[in-house]
Image (cartoon, rainbow, N blue to C red):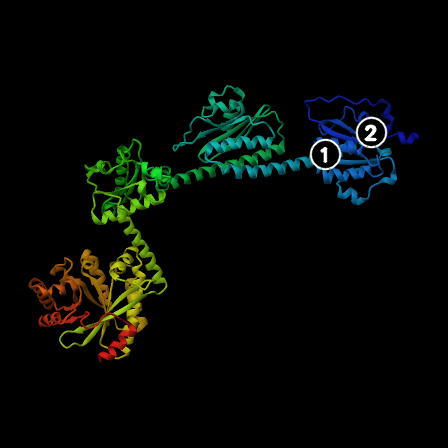
């Protein structure tokens, strides 16, 4: 070796003196693995770099004399910063082959590799350096102490940057997954416990920490902070105030964090401020780990996400409260009651026989009228007083809930929930808005052992008994009756079938002629809806029309009937029956529908029919139920040109005064009145009605006329019009046209 070659402190000059150096075991180091089959290279390298620090840390050398030994070392140690690798060892390409093993098989990506060789002709191809991420390539003759230090420094800096980037990626992934997992925790305490564990994982430390919360009051004041979650040796402090902390440093750091609302970093622990809209929350973890600038940024990101998660968890908790609690009365709601009933539902036949739990349901009679007349605030106050009475009455072992607007439920054993106790709190007037108010209740009782199903079926049965009970008698407790429930189920089934029938055009309209009793002339027709089910069985209107009215379906069905009737009337006029009118029944639900008047006007315009030929029949009970409202609607209908008939007259309770006020054109005698013509009293009633109608200048239509005697009697009283089986059954449009041709 020439003098010039040794001017750069040739590495090999130190071979004879190589002794290595000791490293403080508690201090962080950079591990460097020397892989070379020449022992002198190991000694020279360690000697040349003895007591050297790179990027603030000393070096710790590891050694392998072959590719096989290197594999064993690398399999056990993944934290090697740099590998000084000889290209030629057991084979000419042993070093290059090992590079492929390191990157592809052992999946070591971060470690930097510096290739060294004593033979210039063994230089790797450019593609090898690129594909296997080789940091540097040097001839051993080039590696002076200074150059070796420079190459190692460059490689270690590169390793540190890669480690930082990868740690950042892992931390970000952990932050994202932490927030996603924490949002699934139930309750703030479980959430806080999860924060400690995830934060410890982020910092790669043992979970030793706690979380405290200081809740904000409505007036801006705050409670003293309390520990809501803890891990490690702090776990005994859960639910204790922070002031009970024995460790003075942890207490000081936490209180400082909450006071300044910012993170606090100390040599033996950190406190992170987690914020919150309705609380101040801070997390403390014991840690000797060095927190650098990048760590602080990641922790800041973690805390921001945790704070958002905590706020979202608050919202979820509130939504959960809303889902299972009645906000106005602070009672369990229907959902909560459903879960509670399911706990006590019999699971088997043997349990069914021994189950003694009962579901009671109470409904305030006339609550809508209370709200309408006294206002919603008074109605809310009424509900609050009622709920308090129920809670007081059933405070011992019974479950009280609000299941609907003014409907309450009580669940408990039969000795605590029964007919006697259910209405007892309301025997005497209640004090509402500082005044006495007598409240009437209707209630139902359903034993759970009689319910076929779960909680949902129990509530349904109790509501069914309550609803049907209110139709029969208010102010009492109605007990479960399977026949009653089956009847209700049958009605619901019929309603479902009716909807299907309407949607699939299975309803049809028939027409019954009306006659002038003095000359037997046809003056008009009444449109009547019919329904034949899928089995071909005819279902009577009195069985399905009330269901259509209660469900609101009558609005669509009634509009369809009217269109069919007007279309048929238009055809009848075209066929020569131009003076005839068409009568169509109108229900109360149709009458109060906001679109009723516009619908009537549109139908007559669409078919080009003068409204005077359309007679709308309104039942007597409907007309007098709310006379003032009826009069307003009747006047609007009359203004369009339609005529009006008071249907089923003689079955209601209208007075002459009522009839005088109504803008009606006809009275229609109910068939039950006509059937009474066989008795002297019945004849007198008919005679009186016809005379009254003449006095009021109203036509009288007798329906349900079935024989000649009835015809002659009505004719003798100068009754205007009649219809019934005596002349013709109701006929569909095609059959009607044929019948009219024969009648001519």
Q: CA distance from mark 1 to mark 2?
A: 18 Å
Residue at the right extreme of this rendering: 2
Q: Quadrant of the C terminus?
A: bottom left
Q: Nearer the viewer, residue 575 or 323?
A: 575
In the picture, measured across the screen, residue 580 lies left or right of residue 308, that is left
User: Residue 200, which numbered label?
Assistant: none
Residue 644 in percent (x, y) is at 20, 66
Q: From this viewpoint, is residue 454 visible?
A: yes
Question: Where is residue 671, by image quadrant?
Answer: bottom left
Secondary structure at badge 1 equals helix
Above or below for 78 versus 607: above
Q: From this viewpoint, is residue 326 visible?
A: no
Residue 701 in percent (x, y) is at 16, 68
Residue at 42% from the left image edge and 31% from the top image edge: 216
Residue 114 in percent (x, y) is at 78, 35
Q: Quadrant of the N terminus?
A: top right
Q: Nearer the viewer, residue 530 or 264?
A: 530
* Residue located beneath label 1 in the image: 157
In the picture, measured across the screen, residue 501 lies left or right of residue 652, that is right
Residue count near mark 2 (Cα–Cα under 10 Å), binned few <14, some 14–19, many ≥20: many
* Residue located beneath label 2 in the image: 145
Between discs 1 and 2, the one toward the N terminus:
2
Secondary structure at badge 2 equals helix
In the picture, measured across the screen, residue 498 lies left or right of residue 666, that is right
């Amino acid at each position: 070796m020439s003098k010039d070659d040794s001017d750069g402190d040739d590495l090999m000059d130190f071979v004879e003196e190589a002794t290595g150096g000791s490293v403080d075991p508690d201090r962080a180091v950079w591990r460097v693995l020397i892989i070379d089959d020449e022992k002198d290279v190991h000694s020279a390298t360690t000697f040349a770099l003895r007591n050297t620090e790179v990027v603030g840390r000393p070096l710790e050398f590891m050694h392998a004399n072959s590719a096989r030994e290197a594999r064993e070392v690398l399999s056990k140690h993944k934290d090697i910063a740099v590998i000084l690798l000889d290209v030629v060892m057991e084979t000419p390409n042993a070093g290059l082959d090992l590079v492929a093993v390191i990157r592809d098989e052992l999946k070591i990506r971060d470690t930097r590799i510096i290739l060294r060789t004593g033979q210039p002709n063994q230089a790797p191809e450019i593609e090898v350096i690129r594909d296997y991420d080789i940091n540097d390539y040097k001839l051993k003759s080039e590696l002076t102490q200074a150059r070796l230090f420079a190459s190692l420094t460059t490689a270690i800096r590169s390793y540190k940057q890669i480690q930082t980037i990868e740690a950042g990626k892992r931390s970000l992934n952990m932050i994202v997954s932490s927030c996603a997992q924490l949002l699934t925790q139930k309750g703030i305490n479980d959430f806080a416990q999860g924060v400690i564990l995830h934060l410890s994982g982020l910092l790669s430390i043992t979970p030793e920490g706690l979380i405290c919360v200081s809740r904000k009051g409505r007036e801006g004041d705050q409670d003293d902070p309390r520990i809501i979650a803890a891990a490690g040796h702090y776990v005994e402090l859960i639910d204790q105030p922070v002031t009970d902390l024995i460790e003075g440093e942890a207490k000081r750091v936490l209180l400082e964090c909450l006071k300044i609302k910012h993170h606090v970093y100390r040599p033996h622990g950190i406190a992170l401020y987690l914020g919150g809209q309705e609380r101040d929350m801070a997390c403390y973890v014991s840690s000797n780990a060095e927190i650098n600038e990048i760590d602080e940024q990641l922790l800041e990101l973690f805390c921001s996400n945790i704070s958002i998660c905590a706020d979202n968890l608050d919202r979820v908790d509130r939504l959960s409260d809303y889902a299972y609690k009645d906000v106005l009365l602070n009672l369990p709601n229907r959902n909560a009651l459903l879960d509670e009933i399911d706990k006590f539902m019999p699971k088997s036949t043997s349990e069914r026989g021994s189950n003694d739990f009962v579901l009671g349901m109470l409904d305030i009679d006339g609550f809508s009228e209370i709200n309408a007349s006294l206002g919603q605030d008074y109605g809310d106050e009424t509900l609050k007083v009622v709920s308090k009475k129920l809670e007081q009455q059933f405070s011992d072992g019974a479950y009280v809930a609000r299941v609907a607007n003014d409907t309450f439920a009580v669940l408990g054993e039969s000795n605590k929930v029964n007919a006697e106790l259910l209405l007892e709190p309301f025997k005497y007037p209640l004090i509402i808005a500082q005044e006495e108010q007598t409240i009437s209740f209707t209630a139902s009782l359903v034993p759970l052992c009689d319910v076929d199903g779960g909680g949902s079926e129990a509530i349904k049965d109790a509501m069914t008994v309550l609803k049907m009970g209110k139709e029969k008698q208010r102010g009492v407790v109605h007990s479960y009756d399977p026949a009653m429930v089956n009847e209700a189920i049958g009605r619901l089934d019929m309603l479902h079938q009716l909807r299907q029938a309407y949607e699939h055009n299975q309803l049809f309209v028939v027409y019954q002629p009306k006659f002038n009793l003095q000359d037997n002339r046809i003056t008009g027709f009444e449109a009547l809806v019919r329904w034949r089910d899928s089995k071909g069985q005819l279902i009577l209107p009195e069985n399905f029309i009330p269901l259509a009215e209660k469900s609101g379906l009558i609005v669509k069905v009634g509009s369809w009937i009217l269109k069919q009737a007007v279309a048929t009337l238009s055809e009848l006029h075209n066929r020569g029956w131009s003076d005839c009118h068409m009568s169509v029944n109108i229900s109360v639900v149709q009458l109060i529908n906001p679109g009723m008047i516009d619908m009537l006007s549109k139908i007559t315009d669409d078919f080009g029919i003068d409204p005077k030929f359309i007679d709308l029949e309104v039942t007597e009970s409907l007309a007098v139920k709310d006379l003032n409202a009826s009069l307003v609607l009747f006047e609007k209908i009359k203004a369009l040109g339609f005529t009006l008939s008071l249907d089923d007259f003689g079955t209601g309770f209208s007075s002459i005064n009522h009839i005088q006020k109504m803008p009606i054109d006809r009275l229609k005698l109910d068939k039950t009145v006509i059937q009474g013509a066989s008795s002297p009293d019945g004849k007198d009633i008919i005679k009186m009605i016809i005379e009254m109608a003449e006095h009021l200048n109203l036509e009288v239509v007798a329906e349900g006329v079935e024989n000649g005697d009835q015809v002659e009697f009505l004719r003798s009283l100068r009754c205007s019009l009649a219809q019934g089986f005596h002349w013709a059954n109701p006929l569909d449009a095609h059959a009607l046209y044929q019948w009219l041709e024969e009648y001519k």
